[in-house]
Image (spheres, rainbow, N blue to C red):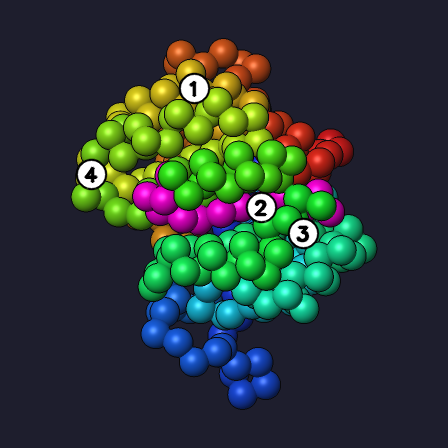
Amino acid sequence: MTGYRITDAQVHVWKESTPERPWPPAEIPPQRVPPLGVPELTGRMAGAGVHRCLLVPPTWEGSRNDYVLEAAAARPDRFGALCRVAAHDPADVERLAGWRQRRGMLGVRLSVNRGDTRRQLDRALRSGFFATMERYGVPLSLYAPRLHAEIRDLAESFPALRITVDHLAVDSDGTPLRAAVEPLLPLAKLANVAVKASALPCFVREPYPFPSITDTVYALVDAFGAERVFWGSDLSRLPCSYRELVDVFTGHLPRLDERERRLVLGEALATWLDWPDHP
């Protein structure tokens, strides 16, 4: 065991598509077959020394939140949920007014990484999605690869909206990781922006222990402070073991002091989402 109470900021869990619970028609394949379910995840958490996970419904299931909310409601000591909302639909957006009554819901995940991304953001603006999120204090996890200027504009336009930039706004290993995150660092000046250091082994080409991840995390902590850097795995597509990724953050970041390490490994996320951890 690691000696840290580790919270994973990003894990997809889902069920198979069945006639009773079908996935929407789409061309987005799942990250793995079979699905990653809560029972398997619980076992893998125990093996890797991970205490809690923030569950995210995957894109290929559509705007479906039942599975992650069921898990978070059943085991609030182990799971929280980021839910999906039809951000272009004013009727769905208005339901965010009662988000705090949805047991286990800690925020909303918006993915803007396929198709006409700028049109998607414009439709979300026109529906009142971002204004409603800000009005009701709903934290936003935003996956918008390479859209650094758009993220900055949103953060400046809605200064009370807490925005977490998922996967550091990176979506491939085509650019060295440290260079790929360089355009993200100026956003640290905006106090309502945090970053999720998640899925990072997917964006590098060297083997474990991934030295470029170490260099990148140092740059993030230097810019944002450890209070706004959140470790996450995106477990269902990891090219390494869960335990190896944990070890990168517990054993291969010597420049971080113990306080910074605890923050990155879960304490900072708990504060950002108002998700207290009770030993």
Quadrant placement of the C terminus: top right
Residue 209 in the image, given as x and y percentages of width and height: 29, 30
Secondary structure mostly taken by the magenta-highlighted segment of the chain = loop
| Image mark for residue 209 | none
Q: If you read the primary sequence from the N terminus, does the residue marked by circle 4 or circle 2 appear first?
A: 2
Check disc 4 and report the residue beneath it. Answer: 175
Q: Left or right? Give the position of 185 relative to 75.
A: left
Question: 187 or 118: nearer the eye?
Answer: 118
Q: Earlier in the sequence, mark 1 or mark 3?
A: 3
Under circle 1, the secondary element is: helix
Say whether disc 2 or disc 3 marks the residue closer to the N-terminus.
3
Q: Earlier in the sequence, mark 4 or mark 3?
A: 3
Label 4 is placed on what type of residue? Thr
Given residues 273 and 239, the one toward you in this image is 273
Which residues, given as a range, are shown in magenta? Answer: 136-148
Q: Amino acid at mark 2?
A: Leu
Q: Which residue is mark 3?
A: 132
* Residue sitting at x 76%, y 55%: 97
- Location of mark 1 (residue): 223
At label 3, the amino acid type is: Thr
